[in-house]
Image (cartoon, helix red, strand yellow):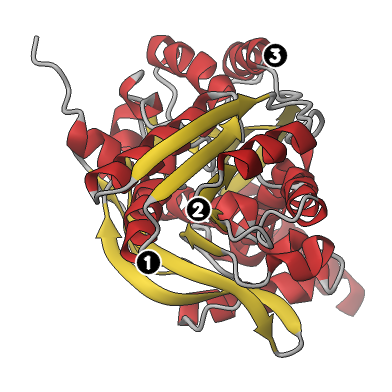
């Protein structure tokens, strides 16, 4: 009898469970387009790590019944490949959002597609200033080269350096950095005595640095797209004695990415750069980011600005998902993104300018030097709440 009652009770529980409506599951599919191969693979890996770290740390914060999945694709640092992958992610994989992209030419190729498909595209690196104007469905959480290179040019003149030579990679962000530095430098009273652009994918640095040395400027603005190219450029600077010739070296954060400093070595000492992030920065948001990074990656990797930007892009998306419980249209997502802010990013306070859908953030002037026995990008000056200067200087043409 007792066994019968027990079985009866169990059956009743099972029947009740079967009768109860199952919780609706909502899957948010994000198409992540990144450079996992090609000349930008190292920055791509850094950005990927920041994106996956945020997901690992914050999946627990998603609303009940909501999941986020990431569909990864490798653009190989080639625009045509990135465009094809975006099309496939939209039409075949039916992603609700696109995310990522290291290379500006790739992002520029994708932007028209998201307009046609009405799929929001969150850029977590690609720094070409004009990209957000290509499509109303593009928002950027990273930076433009104008954010950092313009104030670097202004700062250089304040040091009494009157003549500058620029050497940059021959693609969109390199040209933006070149134009921005030149504007900041010349409008502050300096003179540009020479410029050179070199291959982005396979640069030959010795003749470039020799051109700089022969011009005998007071300061050289050298720009490469981060990663191992930063080490190669700085080793050439050392080999050709550029700084020993009395030529100061400045750049944006791309020349001194945190993870490359051990490889660059002593020649990095004293180099001044303008950037939006340093892993040694004493900010609450950065301390939490570094703690999470060390827990997931231990000493196998060092975070840099690519990583922080990937983290922030996911933070914006997760805030959208939490706010809407995973139910949103493209237009609702873009309205949310255009008004998003985070006072406690690893970079400091950040927000999106609703008028441009581009980032507003602090820019830090940093010196690379030894700190606690290691090379670090040490922030010593802050330019607060910088909007993209290019858009400020080039307002949209009225129809």
- Quadrant where the C terminus is found in the figure: top left
Tell me if 141 is positioned left or right of 388 in this view. Answer: right
Image coordinates of residue 62 in percent, x first then y, are: 53, 58
Rendered image quadrant of residue 86:
top right
Image coordinates of residue 325 in percent, x first then y, are: 42, 49
Rendered image quadrant of residue 44:
top right
Task: Look at the numbered disc 2 and give the secondary structure of its residue.
Answer: strand
The numbered dot on residue 81 is 3
Image coordinates of residue 7 in percent, x first then y, are: 84, 66
Q: Is residue 163 above or below residue 102?
A: below
The numbered dot on residue 159 is 1
- Quadrant where the N terminus is found in the figure: bottom right
Residue 88 seen in this snapshot: yes
Rendered image quadrant of residue 374:
bottom right
Task: Look at the numbered disc 1 and give the secondary structure of its residue.
Answer: loop
Separation of residues labelled 3 and 1 (CA atoms): 44 Å
- For the residue carrying disc 2, how many other residues have a C-alpha within 10 Å: few (<14), some (14-19), or many (20+)? many
Answer with mark 3 or mark 1, whichever residue precedes in sequence.
3
Answer with mark 3 or mark 2, whichever residue precedes in sequence.
3
Query: Which residue is identified by label 2?
Result: 219
Of labels 3 and 2, the one closer to you: 2
User: Tags 2 and 1 in contact by the CB under 8 Å rule?
Assistant: yes
């Amino acid at each position: 009898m007792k066994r019968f009652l027990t079985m009866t009770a169990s059956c009743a529980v099972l029947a009740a469970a079967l009768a109860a409506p199952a919780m609706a599951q909502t899957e948010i599919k994000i198409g992540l387009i990144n450079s996992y191969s090609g000349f930008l693979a190292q920055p791509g890996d850094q950005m990927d790590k920041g994106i996956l770290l945020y997901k690992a740390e914050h999946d627990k914060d998603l609303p009940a019944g909501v999941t986020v999945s990431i569909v990864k694709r490798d653009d190989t640092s080639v625009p045509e490949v990135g465009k094809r992958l975006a099309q496939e992610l939209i039409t075949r994989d039916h992603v609700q959002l696109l995310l990522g992209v290291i290379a500006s030419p790739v992002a520029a190729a994708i932007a028209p597609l998201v307009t046609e498909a009405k799929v929001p595209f969150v850029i977590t690196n690609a720094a070409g200033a004009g990209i957000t104007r290509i499509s109303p469905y593009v928002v950027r959480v990273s930076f433009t080269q104008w954010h950092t290179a313009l104030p670097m040019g202004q700062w250089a003149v304040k040091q009494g350096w009157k003549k500058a030579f620029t050497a940059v990679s021959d693609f969109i962000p390199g040209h933006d950095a070149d134009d921005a530095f030149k504007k900041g430098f010349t409008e502050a009273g300096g003179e540009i005595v020479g410029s050179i652009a070199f291959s982005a994918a396979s640069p030959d640095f010795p003749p470039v640095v020799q051109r700089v040395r022969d011009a005998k400027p007071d300061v050289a603005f050298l720009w490469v797209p981060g990663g191992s190219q930063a080490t190669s450029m700085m080793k050439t600077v050392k080999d050709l004695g550029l700084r020993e010739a009395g030529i100061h070296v400045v750049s944006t954060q791309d020349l001194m990415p945190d993870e490359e400093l051990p490889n660059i070595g002593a020649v990095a000492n004293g180099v001044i750069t303008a950037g939006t992030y340093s892993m040694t920065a004493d900010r609450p948001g950065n301390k939490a980011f570094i703690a999470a990074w060390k827990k997931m990656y231990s000493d196998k990797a060092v975070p840099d600005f690519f990583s922080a930007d990937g983290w922030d892009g996911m933070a914006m998306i997760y805030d959208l998902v939490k706010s809407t419980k995973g139910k949103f249209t493209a237009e609702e997502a873009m309205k949310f993104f255009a008004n998003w802010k985070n006072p406690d990013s690893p970079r400091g306070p950040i927000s999106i300018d609703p008028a441009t859908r581009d980032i507003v953030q602090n820019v830090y002037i940093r010196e690379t030097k030894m700190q606690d026995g290691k090379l670090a990008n040490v922030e010593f000056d802050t330019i607060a709440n910088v909007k993209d200067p290019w858009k400020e200087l080039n307002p949209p043409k009225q129809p």
